[in-house]
Structure formats: C-alpha cells, structure tokens
Image: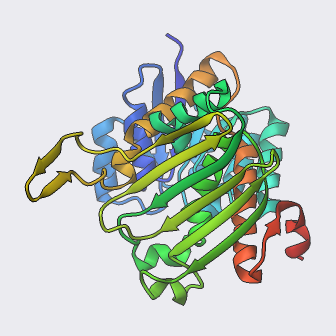
Amino acid sequence: MKKITIGIIGAGRIGKIHADNMSRLPNVDIAAISDLFAGPELEVWAADRGIGLVADSSEIIAHPDIDAVFICSSTDTHVPLIKQAAQAGKHIFCEKPVSMDLAQTREAVAAAAAAGVKLQIGFNRRFDHNFKRVREHVQAGTIGQPHLIKITSRDPSPPDESYIRLSGGLFMDMAIHDFDMARYLSGSEVEEVYAQGNVLVDPVFAKYGDIDTAVITLRFENGALGVIDNSRQAVYGYDQRAEVFGSKGSVAVANDYPNSAVVSSADGTYSDKPLHFFLERYNQAYVDETREFIECLLHGGPLLVDGCDALQAESIALAAKQSLRLRRPVRLDELDELDK
C-alpha cells in the first residue's frame, strides 16, 4: 500500500487533533512533529504515538522522507513556512488564516503554485455533513436560484484574554469560517460587505480594539444577499445554523445535539443543548478534511479548499474590518486602495 509521510509543525491543540486523526488512516505515516515549546508532557504525548519530536520546523521541512507538512503553528509563521515547504517540494496543509495581510497571502499562494505543490487550507466546515448537504442541494438546483444566504455562528463562551490579544479580531479569527461558508453555500463570490459590531459580552475585547458581537451583510456577484450574525457568547451552547433561500424553495440546517430526544410534560418541552463547542460539533469534519487531503495526494484531483479560497475569505474579513471602521459598505475591489 502506498503511503504518505507527514510532518506536523505546531503541537498545540489543533496539531494534536490532526495527528490523532491521521494516525487512524492506514495510508499515512507521521514521521515527526515540531514545536518550539516542547516539554516533558509533549515528549510523552509524542512517544505514546510513535511520533518523532523535534524543536525546529526546519528539520520537518528538510526531512527527505516527508511528502507533506501540516502547518498548525501561530498565524504569523504561516507565510514563511508555506514558502519554505513549497521550495522544498512538500505538499502543504495550513490552518486558517494564511496571514492577516492580503499581499503576504498572495505571495504564499503563488509560491505553492510556482512549486507545483498542493496547498489546502483548514476550512473544516466545508467537510461538515450538514453544510455539505446544503451545498449539494444548491448545486443540484433543488431550491432554484439562491436569493438569500443566512448564517448564524455563535460561540458558547468567549476566549480568554491571552487568545483575544493575538487572535486578529472577530472577523479574521471567527467569522472567517462563515465568510468561506457563504461562498461555499452560495456558489458565488462576494463583491460587497457591510459590517456592524459592538462589545456586548466582555469589555476585554474593546481593550484590543476588537468586538464580540456582529451582523454582516453580503452582496454576491450573482445578485444574492447574505446575512451573518456572530456572537462570542451563546449561553445555551455552540450555535451553528445556515439557510439558503431561493426561487424554488429553501434548504436549512440546524444545530447538532448529543441526542434527538425531546421530553414533553406539563411543565414544558425540553431537549439537550447543542453540542458544546467546535471540537464536538466538527469532530468528523476534522477527520474528513485530513482524509480528503491525503486522498488527493495519493490519487490526484482538485482540493475542495485551496489557497485561493483562503485569499477570498481573508479579503471578505478585511472588507468587514474596513466597513466597521468606515461605517459604510466596502467593495472587495477597493481593498488595495483602502490599505494604502
């Protein structure tokens, strides 16, 4: 059996998730994982899985037997690592976002293209069973021409201050998944963004010039309109819903729950809260995105989500940021002028 040998850069939460998911795939060998802050706990974790642990990512990229690298380190390292891996002829899976700067993201995407290596971005929601079904119905024409795309994405609780300080803000860190999902579900590119936001959950967001609550409206090239609402705190659980409404009907998906039991009594009707957070809600999506990446490396074919998708989602996020600042709609084609 042909196998793909993988190296992982960054052994934080997401790096470990990818490692554990790939360890279950019969056609994958994980040669090594690197982390600048490797300590005894990580040494034990890696040893238990038979994965080599190194401190320097250059050892991963230079490793002659490694076919592809998973970049799971901090966002500020993504662009240089993509360039280095591409130059070394390694295929690349990189977590989102590629960067906070469109020019740098373009450079990274171009480097991978020039080297002829595959570059997949970690927009795992494209692999979710619910959203894939919505996409299939839209593509099949079941609901006709899309008119409205509505996405709700609310976290169960805000992150801690250390995360907020480095996150890049709600649009780039959280809503960027929804921007990619809007493109994916609608089948059209976004041409204009209008964002409104506020700090309604925790004053610490304002300390870093961030917001915790937002409503974003989108205008698509095919004429459809979109609405996304985000919150950093939904006290009832992780709220992930979407609907595409069109000329022939609509297709919508609700939250996933631990079970579908509904209890009805004289006191009311009750069910479980939605699955608590993204690790539970999108657990299978993480598995499927790595599996499909490996399958593309083994058998060829296009990636479901690539560097160009990353660039588009980041463009929407930056347009939303500018819209909030300017208090007006912002077209994506004016971003370069606004950044001057």
- Position in image of residue 7 (x %, y %): 53, 39
Closer-to-camera residue (155/83): 155
Q: Give coordinates of residue 256: x percent, y percent.
A: 35, 44
Can residue 91 be seen here? The reply is yes
Q: Please name whichever residue, 291 or 230, is drawn nearer the observer in this view of the structure.
A: 230
The structure residue drawn at horizontal position 41% and vertical position 71%, both measured from the top left corner, is: 159
At a point 35% along the width and 60% down the height, the residue shown is: 39
**Whether residue 164 is situated above or below residue 270 in the rendered picture:** below
In the rendered view, would you say 131 is above or below 314?
above
Numbered circles on residues, count: 0
Q: 148 or 282, which lies in front?
A: 148
Q: Which quadrant of the view contains residue 99?
A: bottom right
Residue 73 on image: x %, y %: 54, 56
**Visible residue check, residue 120:** no
Q: Position of residue 301 (x, y in %)?
A: 69, 21
Q: Quadrant of residue 166?
A: bottom right
Left/right placement of residue 221 relative to residue 67 reads right
- Image colouring: rainbow
Residue at image point 55% right, 54% down: 151
Q: Residue at x 13, y 48 (%)?
A: 264
Q: Foreground: 184 or 284?
A: 184
